Image (cartoon, rainbow, N blue to C red):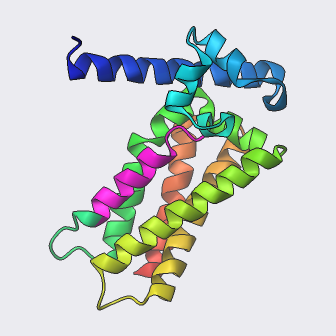
């Protein structure tokens, strides 16, 4: 019997191999011309194994989306004593930028996703769906953290402003061809801009 730690490491290696294979194939052949079977073959696994990790081809390009949201939700759920809304939002966004975006920037996944999203309707739809779901989760968490201070409409506006600003800054930096450090700096400047208005 494999121990749980070894099984989890093997699972993560397989997932990463699928992501790297997809990024390479999408870059070489174009998103629409690559099948799940080809991604699985390039990663030396079966299509069935692909579907154990990702529901659709689009989901490979959103590999760390849930991780980012979970990081932000954890920060909100562990609100520090005396922490203001502005401080907590900055900390949540920075956690996402440092711990999740790092892999996507260094692997080229973020740049590829930005490029493909501009021309692939199926990916645009999946990105919008994931964006709205994540935003709703953050809104609920923030509303629970500040129930007597913020009404639901205000929380929704704040989360929308922060997530939108970070996403737009990242997209602009990626389209400009910036490297990982520059993209992260652009996102942090967007966070600071919104945080000042919240404060």
- Which residue is at the far top? 44
Residue at the (61%, 50%) spot, across then down = 170
Is residue 146 toward the left or the right of residue 93 in the image?
left
- The image shows residue 84 at horizontal and vertical percentages of 28, 77
Residue at the (53%, 54%) spot, across then down = 187
- Which residue is at the far left? 81
Residue at the (15%, 73%) spot, across then down = 81
On the image, which quarter does residue 199 sit in?
bottom left
Nearer to the camera, 85 or 121: 121
Residue 178 appears in the figure: no
Q: Magenta residues: mostly which secondary structure?
A: helix
Find the magenta span and give its range.
Answer: 62-76
Q: Against 72, is 27 above or below?
A: above
Is residue 60 toward the left or the right of residue 184 in the image?
right
Residue 98 appears in the figure: yes
- The image shows residue 73 at horizontal and vertical percentages of 35, 60
Q: Against 4, is 43 above or below?
A: above
Q: Quadrant of the N terminus?
A: top left
- Residue 171 magenta: no
Residue at the (50%, 29%) spot, across then down = 52
């Amino acid at each position: 019997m494999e121990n749980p730690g070894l099984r989890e490491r093997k699972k993560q290696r397989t997932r990463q191999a699928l992501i790297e294979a997809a990024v390479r194939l999408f870059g070489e052949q174009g998103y629409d011309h690559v099948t799940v079977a080809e991604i699985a073959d390039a990663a030396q696994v079966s299509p069935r194994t692909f579907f154990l990790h990702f529901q659709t081809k689009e989901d490979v390009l959103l590999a760390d989306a849930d991780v980012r949201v979970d990081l932000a939700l954890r920060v909100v759920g562990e609100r520090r004593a005396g922490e203001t809304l502005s401080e907590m939002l900055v900390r949540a966004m920075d956690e996402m930028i440092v711990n999740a975006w790092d892999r996507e920037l260094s692997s080229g996944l973020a740049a590829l996703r930005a490029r493909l999203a501009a021309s692939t309707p199926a990916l645009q739809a999946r990105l919008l769906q994931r964006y709205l779901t994540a935003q709703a989760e953050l809104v609920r968490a923030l509303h629970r953290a500040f129930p007597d201070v913020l009404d639901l409409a205000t929380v929704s506006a704040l989360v929308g402003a922060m997530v939108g600003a970070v996403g737009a800054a990242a997209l602009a930096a990626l389209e400009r061809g910036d490297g990982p450090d520059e993209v992260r700096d652009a996102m942090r400047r967007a966070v600071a801009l919104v945080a000042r208005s919240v404060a």
